[in-house]
Image (cartoon, rainbow, N blue to C red):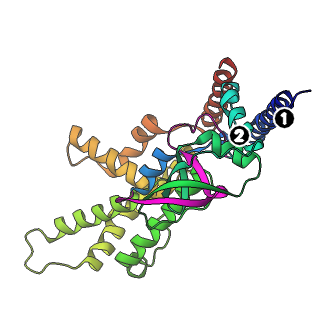
Amino acid sequence: MSDLSLTNSVTDEDFSKARHKALFNEVQHFLNPDEATLISFSDIKKLLKPENEVYKGMQVVPVRLIVGSEGRYKDFDNRFFPKSMHLKARWEHIDMAHINDIALPPISLYELGGVYFVRDGNHRVSVAKAKGIEFIDAEIVSLQSEIKLRPGDSLARMTKQVIQYEKRVFYTETGFGDVTDFWNLDFSVPGQYDVIYNHILTHKYYINMNKSDEIGMDKAMISWFMTVYLPVINIINKYHIMRFFRHRTKSDLYVWMIKYWDEIKNKFGNDFPLDDIAAPFLKTYGESPFMHFIHKIKGLLFKKKIKIQN
């Protein structure tokens, strides 16, 4: 067998191994497919909302810290193994260069939250991870964020980390826990603590209307908590609304129900009672546990059907 034929045989075997690992990874995460999905840089930007970009130039980057991609996140799994046969030719070309010690140009990366996302060079990263290469040359553009992400986390875990960060900032900057002695203002989606803060400010504004002695922020928080937040939570408990919103929090429901109540009052007047929004809210947005299970199974089967067709 010629050297070229031997090399082609090796690259073919390397790609097959990497492809099989991607398939096995997909099977392992059948019930939670998002955990095996490569992270989209666009999704992380929306999550962290970085303020500016800084060009860092050429650096040597640990391959294990490369966790996502700007444009090819659908082509590779969360460990950068190839998910499709159409990647084979390019993947094997990169693999052949490694086998023959041919120098490859540096890849291009975004750095955000202490981890990296591929701008250009997805196949090179995939081959490097498959071959156990620890470091890679890269041109870096860094996006500034106070939040540090953990390599190996799924997008869902990173989202939880961002929510935890937002909670720490909210409680620290407002003193909400010390003032109300309530530490369970929790959310399942990011950005909600800003919503709560605006609710408190709006409540403070209306309390101080036509008053000569304006109340401070601490009293406004207590008033909002006792007269706005807790009454909505009492409605949620009274009608057992959480049974229809699995994997959500009571604070999630507070935000959604307040918004829904405002929409109802715009239609039927400001005298529409809070107690009366539970039934129409459930009818519009609620889902029984059984139907939630059915929809999840249908979604998984639909995704599998699409992948088989492709």
Q: Residue furthest front?
A: 2
| Circle 2 Cα neighbour tier, 10 Å, few/some/many (<14 / 14–19 / ≥20) | few
For image coordinates 50% across by 62% down, the residue present is 113
Q: Residue furthest top?
A: 309
For image coordinates 21% across by 48% down, the residue present is 270
Residue matched to label 2: 97
Where is residue 296 drawn, in percent x and y?
A: 63, 34
- The quadrant holding residue 285 is top left
**Residue 14 in view in this figure:** yes
Q: Is there a contact, CB below 8 Å, between mark 1 and mark 2? A: no
Residue matched to label 1: 10
| Circle 1 Cα neighbour tier, 10 Å, few/some/many (<14 / 14–19 / ≥20) | some
- The quadrant holding residue 208 is bottom left
Q: In the rendered image, which quarter contains the C terminus?
A: top right
| Label 2 secondary element | helix
Q: Is residue 74 magenta?
A: yes
| Label 1 secondary element | helix
Q: Is residue 98 left or right of residue 291?
A: right
Mark 1 / mark 2, whichever is N-terminal? 1
Q: Label 2 amino acid?
A: Ala
Where is residue 228 drawn, in percent x and y?
A: 33, 62
Stretch in magenta: 50-78
- The quadrant holding residue 235 is bottom left
Q: In the rendered image, which quarter contains the N terminus?
A: top right
Where is residue 40 drawn, in percent x and y?
A: 52, 44
Q: Nearer the viewer, residue 288 or 97?
A: 97
Task: Determine the CA span between mark 1 and mark 2.
Answer: 12 Å
For image coordinates 42% across by 49% down, the residue present is 46
Q: Nearer the viewer, residue 297 or 43?
A: 43
Q: Is residue 93 magenta?
A: no
